[in-house]
Image (tube, rainbow, N blue to C red):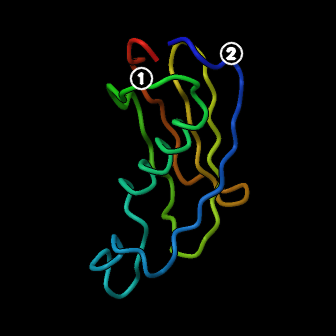
């Protein structure tokens, strides 16, 4: 992957409101932000970080360590290394998720 210089980092902040449509039924008595929503925000952050158009070709490794609750402010950190885009999502210093995205740059971008 070409794009950011290896080791570059990019922080982003997210906050999922309690009225987010994904929370309906996930779970009725104690809503938690679905992992797929967290990953969607990670990809959005990657789109701002990588200076070229790309397609996500895979999630090499993803681990969810704790739930993200609606209304919690989380930070996303991205790092380009080993031709991959590594990410972590944290609430304060608490790790929510970490993983690696395999990206394929789109020709002509």
For disc 2, the marked residue is 5
Q: Secondary structure at mark 2?
A: loop
Task: Please say if 107 is above or below 96.
Answer: above
Disc on the earlier residue, 1 or 2: 2
Rendered residue at 52%/48% (across/down): 97
Measured as percent of width and height from the top left, residue 35 is found at 39, 55
Q: How many marks?
A: 2
Task: Please say if 64 is above or below 27.
Answer: above
Horizontally, is 25 left or right of 2 in the view? left
Horizontally, is 82 left or right of 63 in the view? right
Query: Residue 103 — which label?
Result: 1
Badge 1 density bin: few <14, some 14–19, many ≥20, Cα 10 Å? many
Q: Residue placed farthest to the left in the image? A: 25
Q: Nearer the viewer, residue 107 or 93?
A: 107
Rendered residue at 66%/56% (across/down): 94
Q: CA distance from mark 1 to mark 2?
A: 15 Å
Task: Please say if 64 is above or below 87.
Answer: below
């Amino acid at each position: 992957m070409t794009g950011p210089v290896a080791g570059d980092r990019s922080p982003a902040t997210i906050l999922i409101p309690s009225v987010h449509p994904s929370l309906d039924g996930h779970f009725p008595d104690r809503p938690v932000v679905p992992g797929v929503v967290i990953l969607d925000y990670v990809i959005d952050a990657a789109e701002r970080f990588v200076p070229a158009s790309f397609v996500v070709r895979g999630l090499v490794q993803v681990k969810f360590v704790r739930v993200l609750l609606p209304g919690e402010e989380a930070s996303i950190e991205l790092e380009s290394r080993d031709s991959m885009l590594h990410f972590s999502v944290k609430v304060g210093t608490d790790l929510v998720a970490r993983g690696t995205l395999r990206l394929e740059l789109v020709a002509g971008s």
